Amino acid sequence: MLLTSIVSMSVAGVLTAFSPNVWAYAALRFVTGFGRSMVGTTTMVLSTELVGKKWRDTVCVAGFFCFTLGFLSLPALAYTFQEASWRNMYLWTSVPSLCYSILVYLLVQESPRWLLVRGRKQDAIETLQQIASLNGNSITSSFSMLHACTMQEGAAGASGGDSVFAALHSMWERPWALCRLAAIMTVSFGVGTVYYGMPLNVGNLGSNLYLSVMYNALAELPSSILSWLLMGRINRRSSVIALTVVAGLCSLACVVIPQGAARMAAELVSFSATCTAFNVILMYSIELFPTSVRNSAVGLVRQALVLGGVAAPVLVALGRERSFLSFGVFGLVIGCFGIFAACLPETRGKGMSDTMDEEEQKEAAFATCTVEDMDLV
């Protein structure tokens, strides 16, 4: 899926540079967006399932950091080609992605967790052996996950399903999974509104457009570092609530602060907090759902993030006359929707489950331990 999405996104991007008319341009942009929508989800899920709990946060933050570097390249490219044809931008952003697809094909292994859930034990063992050989270790000394190979193929397949519809049906049958999905998608919608809307709104700040975009891109660098610190030391649920409140308050402050450095600073703090919340939510969603439905669940969470940005261009246009319709609405949406994170369980320090039944057993065991601890107190 990762390879297919990168190639389709890149090829459509290259072809966009040669669009003969607006209809061909629009169609190719649709194909590019469709392919791009799968890249982030598949990359995060695959990378986290290839490592243990110790390195999960680090791997996620590494992906966020690389995304930020790509974001930073955009204002630099736009400034370089400001006097040239717009077609140059599509070539310079799409051709490198084609090169990345070659590296993915040569270097990336399939997720052993996913293979096990699908009952493909031998493929999972071979994948683990490849990873272990790269580390210079034997398979038995490096992977505590191998005990999962004893699980019965029928049970694994029944828990996982073979399609996104089976995954959704599996979550629909379990109220706890449906509540988690609804809550995390609601929070994601609010975060996505600001994450995709704030960069579009920099034109309403009254400062240089290229510098404003660059500042927003630079704001993602500390947010990546902050995400790593938060995920390693602070609860996910508390982090999401705190970050969305800060982002909402700073966005509302932009309504009353006049144009200038102070307004730019408030916007950057709001966007940085939103970026950090964006990162934490993606990591949070990976830990909330077992391997059998993880890819589908995280895909829906990312879809909610993107849907949050659908209304952003309209709000930005309205905000040119009244700041409240852009900054004000952004602040209210992310602040109010972020509170729904209180409905989610905490996942920091917990191992990831592979099946729905395993997740239910862990939750039951955790609830039992909590009750016993309270009795002791």
Image: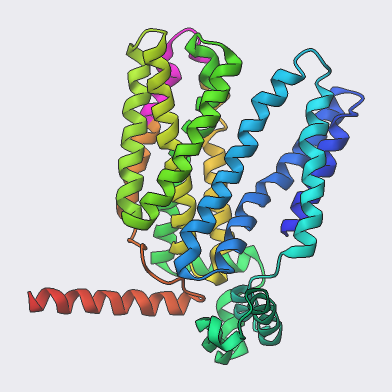
Is residue 147 visible in the rendered image? The answer is yes
- Residue 106 location, x and y as percent? 79, 63
Q: Position of residue 257 (x, y in %)?
A: 34, 12
Q: Quadrant of the N terminus?
A: bottom right
Q: Which residues are magenta?
A: 316-332
User: Which image quadrant is residue 157 in?
Assistant: bottom right
Q: Is residue 268 above or below residue 159?
A: above
Residue in view at x 55 percent, y 81 percent: 142
Residue drawn at x 61%, y 85% is 139
Could you tell whether 364 is left or right of 309 in the image?
Answer: left
Look at 71% across and 22% down and name the residue there.
Answer: 78
Could you tell me which quadrant the C terminus lies in?
Answer: bottom left
Q: Closest to the observer: 344 or 165?
A: 344
Q: Position of residue 92 (x, y in %)?
A: 80, 33
Can residue 188 be seen here? no
The single residue placed furthest to the front in the displayed view is 136
